[in-house]
Image (cartoon, grey):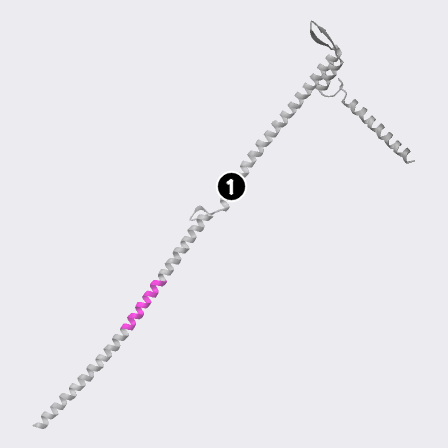
Amino acid sequence: MKFFRLTMVVMVLLLGFQAYAQTDESAEQPSLEGGTINSQFEYIYDKSGNYRAEGRRYEVVRTINLDKLRQNVLDSLNAARAQAQQLQQEISTQQSTIASLNSTLEETTKNLNAVTEEKDSMSLLGAQVSKSSYNIIMWTLIAGLFLLLLLFIFKFRQSNVLTQEAKSSLADLETEYEDHRRRALEREQRISRQLQDEINKYRKSK
């Protein structure tokens, strides 16, 4: 039973392989009714007769086959020319489309640059300057004002210190003046008492 099954499988495989080989051979068999120009020339070469004359070999080709081959070649050339013309038209159309797209891209790029420049610029005293320049100018002004503020604070403190020193010196001078005036008044009173004492002594002595 196993041997019978094995025999049947082998026969089926052989029949399938033979059918495939025959189909493949028929598909690859040259003909004037189809295939490439090279295969058609091979067909003409295979179907032609040959003879020798004067030491040279000649091929005898049937006129109908030669006319058929020439017609096939002309058809192939016409088809190739038509395809080339169609491709050339497609190329021209694509080139026109590319040129239009390039023009649109260039215009879009210009508009984008203009919008970007306008976005990145600011008005300063009626003139358009870039944001970076505007920031530099503003920060420079702020730094200058800050330095002026620091200078004003320094001068104010320095003036305040001088004023306090002047007030302190004036207070010391007033204190010294009061002390001097008080000592002078005491000295004057002492001298007056001494003078009065001398006057009284002089009067008693008389």
Q: In which quarter of the image is residue 66?
A: top right
Q: Which residue is drawn at 38% across and 55% down?
A: 144
Task: Examine the image and state in which quarter residue 163 appears.
Answer: bottom left
Identified at 43% across, 53% down, the residue is 139
Identity of the amino acid at label 1?
Answer: Asn
Q: In this view, does 162 lie to the left or right of 28?
A: left
Rendering quarter of residue 97: top right
Query: Do we see residue 123 in this rendering?
Result: no
Of the 4 image quadrants, the one containing the C terminus is: bottom left
Q: Nearer the viewer, residue 128 or 154?
A: 154
Q: Magenta stretch mostly in which secondary structure?
A: helix
Residue that carries the numbered disc 1 in the rendered image: 113
What residue lies at 67% left-to-right and 21% top-to-bottom?
80
Where is 66 relative to 24, above or below? above
- Residue 24 rendering spot, x and y as whole percentages: 78, 25
Residue 15, position as x, y percentages in the image: 85, 28
Q: In this view, does 90 lie above or below 54?
A: below
Left/right of residue 200 with respect to residue 30 in the rendered view: left
Residue 96 lies in the magenta-colored region = no
Residue 128: % across, % down:
45, 46
Range drawn in magenta: 153-169
Label 1 residue SS = helix
Residue visible at 67% across and 23% down? 83
The crowding category of the residue bearing disc 1, from other C-alpha atoms within 10 Å (few below 14, some 14 to 19, many at least 20), is: few
> Which residue is at the front of the view, 14 or 100?
14
173, above or below 96, in the image: below
Residues 150 and 35: in front is 35
Single out the residue that lies furthest toward the left: 206
Q: Quadrant of the N terminus?
A: top right
